[in-house]
Image (cartoon, rainbow, N blue to C red):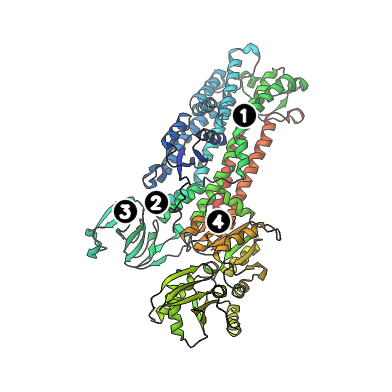
Amino acid sequence: MQLVPETQKIPENTPITEKIILDVGGMKCAGCVKAVERQLSQNPNLKNICVNLATEVAVVEAEVGTVDAQALAQTLTATGFPTQLRTANSQSDQKRLDPEVRQHQEMQEALRQLIIAFVLLLFSGIGHFGNHLPILNNIWFHCGLATVALLIPGLPIIKDGWLGWRRGAPNMNTLVSLGTLTAYTASLIALLFPQMGWECFFDEPVMMLGFILLGRTLEKQARSKAASAFRELLALQPQIAKLIINPDSQKYIAGANVIEIPAEQVKVGEWLQVLPGDKIPVDGEVKYGQTTVDESMLTGEAVPVIKQPGDHVAAGTINQSGAIAIQATRTGNDTTLAQIVALVEAAQTRKAPVQKLADTVAGYFTYFVLTASLLTFVFWYFWGTHIWPEVNISTTTMEMLSHGVHQQVATIDKIDNSGILISLKLAIAVMVVACPCALGLATPTAILVGTGIGAEQGLLIKGGDVLEKVHKLNTIVFDKTGTLTTGKPQITDYLLFTDIEKSALLQLAAAVESGTYHPLATAINQAATTQNLSIPNAEQFHTEPGMGVSAVVDHKTILLGNREWLNWHGITISDTAQAQIETLAAAGKTVINIAIEDTLVGVIAVSDTLRTEAKTTVEQLQNMGLRVMLLSGDRAEAANAIAQQLGLEQTNVIAGIPPAKKASTIQYLQTSANTTPSIIAMVGDGINDAPALSQADVGIALHSGTDVAMETAEIILMRDSLSDVVAAIQLSRATFGKIRQNLFWAFAYNTIGIPLAAGVLLPNFNFVLSPSSAAALMAFSSVSVVTNSVLLRSFTHQH
């Protein structure tokens, strides 16, 4: 299977583009994503730019030779986002192959910072209770705790916040830094100038940083779980291969004839030894031995597959029972596994259109929050405290006031405290409660989990945009031959209209079909081989897709095809012959007319059986509220016979459509004014399906299909099972459902949280969020979004 498009002939004036993949560090929220996109967009040669927060990857597209990729990485690094260029040879890219090392280091650092913040928070809390240790009640001690909190666990946040401000792209760390520094500075002024009558609240910076670091640590763990399926996919890539030095010696299993080499160094054509328990290092063909292979990591199919000489094996699958020798057919980045990894990673960078609103909001979110914070301060300082003079955010005991301790509730108090303190705390709360992270993580984390577990189950979904289109689907169109049917037709009937014998008719048909590759041609050639018939030479082959073929055999023109093909060549079919042909077609058989020169001499009828799971699949799709249709190049009688077996009405059957017109048929269904416009998924497997797969809103290709069909399709079913069409749609719907839930929560949280922090309920209900409470809520918001995405891992489908 070829998942990455092969090199094709390109028109002379068409520019050749390349994709550049950058690993971007330092992105903390959606604002950072927007800043990276803005920086990259300054390069006029870049065509498409996509930045993913969850995977920390930027993918850009440009014409070959117009962009210096290293310069792009250096520019992003200089602006505060440490960036590395993804090397072309992913096999040797340690950062990509072993991301767990980097993630483990990041998690260890986050835990260290969290432990320090927790210890500081503990000492700060103990200071509020009892007088056993006077130093713990000392205001200078609390000042020291806040100072240490800012200089150790808070320093990376402050630095990053300052960098964001300096590069004109303030982010979440900018908001947190401003909030904590403002609270610390106000408390320090209150401590150094007690005559001002301000309240010290040194515990606020400590608590804010503690809650934020706790939230980020939990978020990292959740994101790690979200990426676990993709990491497991990466881990499948074999590192070692056992090269057979001299295949001609026939000592395929002898140790002396075998050396170990890195799997990435294997070349096409080389022979490799694979022992029981070994991972198969490359795609190859079994040349010696027999075994069973566990392919569950690629297809989701738990039952091992028997492999014999001539069978193909895939890299990353596990040899179970016997020693075999294989010949490499695809290596390095061309293996099925490497292409699946590339496809899944590319899918994680394709955004769902519904994310565009979140991206737009995120780009200006920090500016909005800073403005809201400033307006909150101005309102409460100049108007709020004068309109409601009885409102004050204060503590309830003089002991707490003497130590600068702030109780995290709003109370009505007659203490004549300065209005600036109320205004300042509310402004800080607004800065800290806002969460651009939740907006930025809503879509990519759900896509990360959904595409990862899809790959585990043999369902390859190519991106967030595909998920959104699947959610809107109302029609599924199945190609008949090779999709609903097994694609292995067999000859069932012969009709002879002259004195020609059946064997001679089959010989002529096999000779003409020897120049084509089609399931019907295979059926005819296999029948001729089974009967040990000699096949005469043919020349001057001509094929008209969906109609028929012709060739010259023994100086005579032989035509094979449908009625339209014969009519096109001026050959008439008698009424008697037509009646017999229609009887065969009504039984669901495909009729192949055979003519010599201008005379119809006979007919071969071929029948293709339905897949065992076809009827169940159709019923499940109908139960999901989808219209199921059948598209076929066969005559209406044959197509209707298949539809009847599937329980489809004739109104859902489109027959007699040649391959060249399948795409236009799909387009008609999408736009027809006579019917309700449909959002269509096309399910196919052959090269003739590729245009229709491309035209459909969602193309779904079976693994047994051709490379071209799979390149065109947006969902690929690795197991070659129609039941996976249902599974893929269910997974897509579940994933998109998580995206919508996440976006709703992210917008709702910020829509409700910011007004609460600004004190909208303070006058009437005496309720307000303190800065530390706001920080705790903000941390919870990000964690909840990622955790909700991780819940997708519970998705299962019974094959």
On the picture, is 574 further left or further right than 321?
Answer: right
**Chain-order first, disc 3 or disc 2:** 3
Tell me which numbered mark, 2 or 1, is placed earlier along the sequence.
Answer: 2
At horizontal 61% and vertical 78% (from top left) the residue drawn is 586
Compare residues 71 and 411 and report the one nearer the observer: 71
Q: Is residue 680 left or right of residue 331?
A: right
Viewer-side label of 1, 4: 4
Q: Nearer the viewer, mark 2 or mark 1?
A: 2
Q: Are marks 3 and 2 in contact (CB under 8 Å)?
A: no
Residue beneath the point at 38% across and 59% down:
318
Measured Cα–Cα span from mark 2 to mark 4: 25 Å
778, 247: nearer the viewer: 247
**Amino acid type at image mark 3:** Val
Task: State the residue position of label 1.
Answer: 367
Relative to 134, say whether 769 is above or below. Answer: below
Residue 167 vertical position relative to residue 192 in the rendered view, above or below:
below
Q: Is residue 126 visible?
A: no
Q: Position of residue 293 (x, y in %)?
A: 39, 63
Using the image, tell me which numbered label, if any, was put on residue 605: none
Task: Name the front one of labels 4 and 3.
Answer: 4
Question: What is the C-alpha distance between the residues marked 1 and 4?
Answer: 42 Å
- The answer to whether residue 416 is seen in the rendering is yes
Which of the two discs, 2 and 4, labels the residue nearer the N terminus? 2
Residue at numbered disc 2? 333
Q: CA distance from mark 2 to mark 1?
A: 44 Å
Percent coordinates x, y for residue 141 in the rendering? 53, 20
Percent x, y of residue 242: 29, 56
Question: Within 10 Å of the Cα at label 4, are there few (<14), some (14-19), or many (20+) other Cα atoms?
Answer: some
Secondary structure beneath dot 4 equals helix
Q: Quadrant of residue 354?
A: top right
Q: Which mark is residue 266?
A: 3
Residue beneath the point at 45% across and 65% down = 303
